[in-house]
Amino acid sequence: MINGILKKIALVDLIGLSVVSLILQFNDSFILIILQRFVLCFTFGYLMIGFKVLITEVANPLHRGKILFGFLNISIVGVLIYRYWYGSFEINIAELDITYAHLQIPYFILPLLILLVIKYLPGSRINESRNALTFSYFFKPIRKKLLLAMIVLAILLSFANSQLFFLMLLQKSIDVQRNYIDTISLAIWLVAAITGVLSIDYFGRKGLLQFGMIALMIFAAIIIVVSLVANSPMVVWVSICLYYFLSIYTITTTATIIILEYLPNAIRGRGMILFALICWVPNTINNAAIYPSIFDSEYLVYIVSITSLVVLITSYFLFENRLVETKKMSLDKIETAIIDQWDSEK
């Protein structure tokens, strides 16, 4: 996937994105806008998956965890730059005389810069198979467990680690302004990302995920009990901040790294596409149905905390003794270790 196909698709797609974005400056018709949005979404989708797979395959096993942890949280750099720019110049976009096309001006140059990055990236160490595996591969006996792991992690990521849910809890639990909430959540994200980069190759993926699930169960229970008994907004707020930190540090990124390393070499790219599709289902249910229906509920804290607690407990027992530690292991050794352990469970 990575050596040849990704670079060929990137060449055509990124140049196409640049050209369409340029044409938009002279003719911002609805059809062109839809075309540009489609190309833009496709670009970010396959590049994010492609780069995740590429980094997994080219990184030194001794440092692969910290490299992936850093890459998967690199978007915080853009958020920090945006907040600094927005805060420094205090621009009110609503008062500016700009069109949708004007907002796409950066896409003239960015695609060409990405092409330069791709050009100088090393090729994957994994030999590409001409007989590419299909999705039916995941329904073979030994791989059904991998598919189950992907489903459980997707549910865990959505219902026990939803940034949207816990930002909402922060807003409900203490009387603070929205800009302070954003700053606090951003600071927590930054600290969690740095902590993860420094420690994931020391504690390991299995140890970090299991510790995270146990710690989050405790904090979810604390939030429920304190809300029922003590009715202390400050204690609830602090507990939620700690939950938010631990969820980013131990689950959000670690779960993705686990899937990247567990997937067999021959189908890692397609496997990550399948994982993204699986994650889309609970995220859509969460954001489109559950979140709007409970946003104004007086039982908001209880609903979110109890849901998280149930998902965490279920996930912990499903993964108990089934996770394989992968830190500092080559991808070939990981694949062999997973097959050996899961075969022994029959």
Image: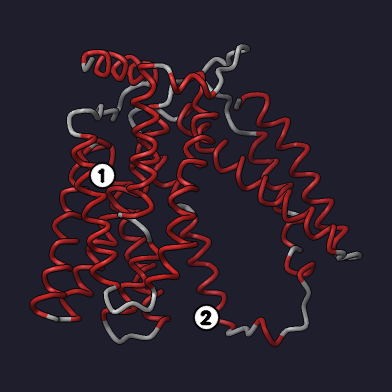
The three-letter code of the residue at mark 1 reads Ser
**Residue shown at 25% from the left, 42% from the top:** 315
Placement of the C terminus among the 4 image quadrants: top left
Q: Which mark is residue 87?
A: 2
Q: Name above or below for residue 260 compared with residue 289.
A: above
The three-letter code of the residue at mark 2 reads Gly
Apparent side of residue 256 relative to residue 79 in the rendered image (left or right): left
- Circles 2 and 1, Cβ within 8 Å, touching? The answer is no
Q: Name above or below for residue 85 compared with residue 79.
A: below
Q: Quadrant of residue 149?
A: top left
Q: Name above or below for residue 201 compared with residue 182.
A: above
According to the picture, the residue beneath numbered tag 1 turns out to be 199
Residue 103: where, in percent of width, then height? Answer: 73, 68
Name the N-terminal-most of marks 2 and 1. 2
Crowd class of label 2 (few under 14; some 14 to 19; many from 20; radius 10 Å) = few
Crowd class of label 1 (few under 14; some 14 to 19; many from 20; radius 10 Å) = some
Outermost residue toward the right in this view: 26
Q: Quadrant of residue 176?
A: bottom left
Q: Secondary structure at mark 2?
A: helix
**Residue shown at 32% from the left, 64% from the top:** 188
Of residues 167 and 50, the one drawn nearer to the viewer in this rendering: 167
Protein image colouring: secondary structure
Cα separation between marks 2 and 1 = 32 Å
**Residue shown at 29% from the left, 46% from the top:** 198
Apparent side of residue 8 relative to residue 272 in the rendered image (left or right): right
Residue 158: where, in percent of width, then height? Answer: 38, 53
